[in-house]
Structures are given as C-alpha cells and as structure tokens.
Image (cartoon, coloured by chain):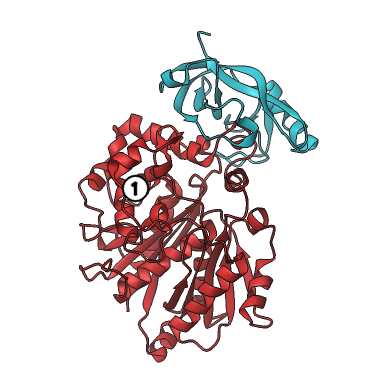
C-alpha cells in the first residue's frame, strides 16, 4: 500500500442555505478543495450522501456532481452508510489511492436537508434505523439516542448537567468557526430549559437539520511533497458495522462499531488512543459524544460525563473534542459530516484553524470518528502531521 | 405503506412468531435465514412469551405524522422472559412514571394509521403487567 496524504480541503457554510441547491453546495466545496490543494486535476471522486433521493429527489449523484464540476467522464461514485456516508467516502478514496488505482482522488460529502418539511426530514433520517422493528412502532432518531441516554444514566449515574455540558462546550467552539450553522454560545440553563424532544433529550441536545458540503483531496505522500503545500498523512482507517436495531445489541450504553473501527485504525497507525492529541467525534446528540468518548477508550465506561463537566475536552483542555463545534453547533448535513470532520483535523494539524480556535498545544495526531444510525456503522480515521 | 409490506409482517406482529435455531437454540425475532450466533440455517417457529421487563425507555414528544394524535407516547426496549429484546410502545400508563425494570406484558393493538394508503397497521405494544 502507498502512503496517502490529504493535500487540500474545502467546505461551504453550514446552515439553512436557501440560495444553493445540492449540486451548487457540492461544487462550491469541491472547487474550494481543488484550489486549496493546488492539484491541476483529479482522477476520481467518491461522494458521501445519505439520501439525495428522499431529501431532494435526486440520485445518480456521481454523474450529476462530476457533470456540474465540469469534469467530463470522471469516474465518480456515491457511497452511503447513513450519517457515516462522508467517513465512508473518505475511506474509499484512501483505499483507491493507497492501492495505486488512482493518484489523486476527491472525497466529498453533501446533504441538502431543508428542501423538505421537518416531517419529511424525520422520515428520511429514520430510514437509518430498522423500519419494521423500530420506526414502525414510533421510534425516532432522538428517541433511539434517548433510549441510550436513559440506559447510560441508569447504569452509570450520568446526569442532565453532563449532557448539557457537551452542548455548551461544542457551542463555545462553534462560536469560533465561521462555517458553523449556529456560531454562538449557549448556557447550561438554556439547554436544560429548551423544549423536550424525547426524554431526557431536549432540542439543544440535538444536532440540527443542515444544508452543506465538504470535500478533501487525497494523493500519495510523494505527490503531496511535490505540490509544496501543507499536507497531513492518513495513517489509520477503520470501519465496522453492528446490528441495525439498537435493541439487538448486548450493551446499549456503548457503540461497539466505534470500538472495533478505532482498534483497527489505531493498529494500522501503530498507535494507541493515548498517542492521539485531539478528536472530532459524532455528537449527533449530546449523549452520543459521551458514549463515543467511552467507546474510543478515551475514558472508562461512565467516566466521560465528569470529564466534560471538568473542561477536559474543551478547546485547549487536556484532550480537545470537536474544536469545530461538532455536529451540534457546526451543523450536521448528514452525508457531509464525516468529510467536514477531516477538514477540521486538517486545519488543526496544519495550524490554520480560524478565529482563535487553533489549538495552542501544537497537536501532532488527530482522530475523526463518524457513525451511522444508532451505531449500526462507524468509521475512524487517524491523521498525523507530515 | 404498501399492503404487501404490512401483511408480510403478520406472523411477527399478529402472532409473535420467532425463529428458534435448530442447532444452537438462539431465538431470532424476527426470524432470519442465517443464525446470528452459530450461522446455521434451519429454524423452527416458536412463539415469543408475552411478558418481560423494561431495559430502557423514552417519551416521544415530537412525533412523526402517523403518531402525532397519540403524542406524547412512550417507547421502550423490553427483555422478554426468554431473553429476546424488542422495541415497542409502552401504553396504558402515566408516561412520567415509567421506570427501568418495570414489568410489562405484550398486547395486540393498533400501532399506526398511514395517511397516504389508509392502511391500519396492527401489532404488539407493551402494557404494565399489573394492568
């Protein structure tokens, strides 16, 4: 396998982007990544999108997005793993470059979620759960994560304040991200008095409905050196699945797919979790960030909440998590999220994060964790300074 | 909802039919073609027991359109007496008083009305055991 690098990144503003269509969003992010990298062409493109079909009635995205990017006959594929589609696109771009099949590959992600009603979006997102044995009975995505939250609270004594602290911390970071959907701070009281969605999760425990796209350029380390611009190395990649239905798992207080994917990625990188300096994790709900911290092995089961309350995962804390603002504040265009996590890791490792959000600790190793559904799939990537 | 999608599930939703692996005894609900424990491919039909206890629960306050008329409603994952776990609504109780460990029984109820097709879908719900 060849050593692979990320040489350029691009993303749109995340939010309710009424003036842009799915294709406009994707092309804007893609052009940004190409320009940022300095490459004069790409050989192939892998796109993560959860549900162009349900959100905007458009499938066949490989062809459409290559067409609108203006590259005739480009091999372009769309991959899907629910909210982990972006992470999956990144992994497949990595495999394509590492294998020698292509030298320069774009991994992109896009979702246009505001062109349908809230009920339509709820339906589209719920297709990531078991339609006949969860959704049929009235389960929603906030509902499934609420089931995890209650189980976690029951088993470990996790508190309402611990959940709220995740949202507050991520908004503190997102307030410094010009691309964030909600770039402002919130307080513990605001979270705890916001409208209840699925007990104990309130609206400010939930990531929003978002339009947005992100793209990154992967190439060999040899080509990256010749380009003469800052780049980061991809040293680990792990991917795992689990049962689609939450109730089928032995333990509902952990995400086993993330544990397995992280083990694979760290082994490939020749590292342990203690060697990692910071992470972007999939905080689709506040409870998800706590469960993922524990599933990655960063904290013992039941210990993540206390760490967040103590500020250990804050910007410039002991182990910063979601310096971008995470899905909670930056926004969660589901197919784009996994790629946008790579954008943030790239910025932090190359020292260009905006607005004072750049980590002062001079980080060398970053981890991105993306997941689909209630943990039915997960991807973990390790990136390092060149 | 299409009618075929609804009636295909009748054995599970109307009669609680599960599949018991003939080789290792693992009970799959719904039944499958391949045993998730041992990989064997032969099953015999077995009915699920109708009692269990709540492992976790939530109250859905913001409901999908098929369920807005009954919101807020509780969803629970219960473990039945044979170890099978499943998700269903927990009804006929005060949703603010549900606790992990509550004993429940399965009853046959109307689950949802699909507004587009007009199909009334029936299936299982949990009720408090003492009800």
Q: Which residue is mark 1?
A: A167
Vertically, is A319 above or below A160? Answer: below
Q: Is residue A102 left or right of residue A253?
A: right
Question: Could you say which quadrant of the image residue A136 lies in?
Answer: top right
Q: Residue at x 43, y 45 (%)?
A: A206
Side of A38 where A92 appears, left or right = right
Tell me if I can see residue B45 in this picture: no
A287 on left or right of A144: left
The C terminus of chain A: image quadrant? bottom left
- Counting the numbered discs, the total is 1
Answer above or below: position of A373 versus B71: below
Mark 1, residues whose alpha carbon is within 10 Å: few (<14), some, or many (≥20)? many
At horizontal 54% and vertical 43% (from top left) the residue drawn is A243
Q: Which chain is in red here?
A: A
Q: Any idea which chain is the cyan one in this picture? A: B
Q: Residue at 47% of width from left, 21% of height from top? A: B95
In x, y percent, where is residue A209?
Answer: 51, 52
Image height of B87 relative to A269, above or below = above
Residue A128 screen position, x and y as percent? 58, 47
Q: Residue at x 59, y 22 (%)?
A: B125
Work out whether residue A183 or residue A225 is closer to the camera in this orientation and state it.
A183
Instruction: Say if B79 sits above or below A305 in the image.
Output: above
Q: Nearer the viewer, residue A350 or A183?
A: A183
Residue A133 falls in image quadrant:
top right
Where residue A15 appears, as percent x and y from the top left, is: 48, 59
């Amino acid at each position: 396998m060849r050593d692979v690098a990320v040489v350029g990144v691009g993303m749109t503003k995340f939010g309710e982007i009424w003036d842009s269509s799915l294709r406009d969003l994707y092309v804007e992010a893609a052009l940004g990544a190409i320009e940022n990298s300095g490459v004069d062409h790409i050989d192939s493109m892998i796109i993560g999108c959860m549900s162009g079909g349900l959100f905007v009635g458009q499938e066949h995205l490989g062809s459409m997005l290559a067409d609108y990017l203006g590259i005739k006959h480009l091999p372009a594929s769309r991959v899907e793993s629910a909210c982990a589609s972006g992470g999956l696109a990144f992994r497949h771009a990595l495999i394509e470059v590492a294998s020698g099949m292509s030298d320069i590959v774009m991994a992109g992600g896009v979702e246009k979620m505001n062109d349908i009603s809230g009920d339509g979006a709820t339906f589209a997102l719920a297709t990531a759960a078991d339609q006949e044995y969860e959704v049929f009975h009235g389960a929603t995505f906030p509902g499934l994560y609420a089931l995890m939250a209650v189980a976690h609270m029951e088993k470990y004594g996790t508190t309402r304040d611990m959940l709220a602290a995740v949202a507050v911390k991520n908004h503190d970071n997102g307030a410094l991200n010009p691309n964030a959907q909600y770039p402002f701070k919130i307080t513990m009281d605001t979270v705890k008095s916001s409208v209840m969605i699925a007990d104990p999760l309130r609206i400010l425990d939930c990531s929003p409905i978002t339009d947005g796209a992100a793209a990154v350029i992967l190439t060999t380390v040899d080509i990256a050196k010749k380009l003469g611009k800052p780049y980061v190395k991809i040293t680990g990649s792990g991917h795992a699945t689990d049962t689609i239905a939450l109730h089928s798992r032995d333990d509902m207080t952990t995400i086993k797919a993330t544990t397995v994917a992280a083990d694979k990625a760290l082994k490939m990188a020749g590292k342990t979790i203690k060697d990692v300096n910071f992470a972007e994790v999939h905080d689709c709900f506040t409870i998800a960030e706590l469960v993922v911290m524990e599933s990655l092995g960063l904290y013992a089961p039941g210990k993540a909440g206390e760490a967040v309350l103590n500020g250990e995962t804050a910007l410039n804390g002991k182990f910063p998590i979601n310096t971008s603002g995470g899905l909670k504040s930056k926004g969660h265009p589901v197919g784009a999220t996994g790629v946008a996590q790579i954008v943030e890791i790239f910025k932090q490792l190359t020292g260009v994060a905006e607005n004072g959000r750049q980590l002062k600790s001079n980080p060398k190793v970053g981890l991105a964790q993306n997941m689909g559904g209630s943990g039915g799939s997960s991807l973990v990537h390790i990136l390092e300074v060149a | 909802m299409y009618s075929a999608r609804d009636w295909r599930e009748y054995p599970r939703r109307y009669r609680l039919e599960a599949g018991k692996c003939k080789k290792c005894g693992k009970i799959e609900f719904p039944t499958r073609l391949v045993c998730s424990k041992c990989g064997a491919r032969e099953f015999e039909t077995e009915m699920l027991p109708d009692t269990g206890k709540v492992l976790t629960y939530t109250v859905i306050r913001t409901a999908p359109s098929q369920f807005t008329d009954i919101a807020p409603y509780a969803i629970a994952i219960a473990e039945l007496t044979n170890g099978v776990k499943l998700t269903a609504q927990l009804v006929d109780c005060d949703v603010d008083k549900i606790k992990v460990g509550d004993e429940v029984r399965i009853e046959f109820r109307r689950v949802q009305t699909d507004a587009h097709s007009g199909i009334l879908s029936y299936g299982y719900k949990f009720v408090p055991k003492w009800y």
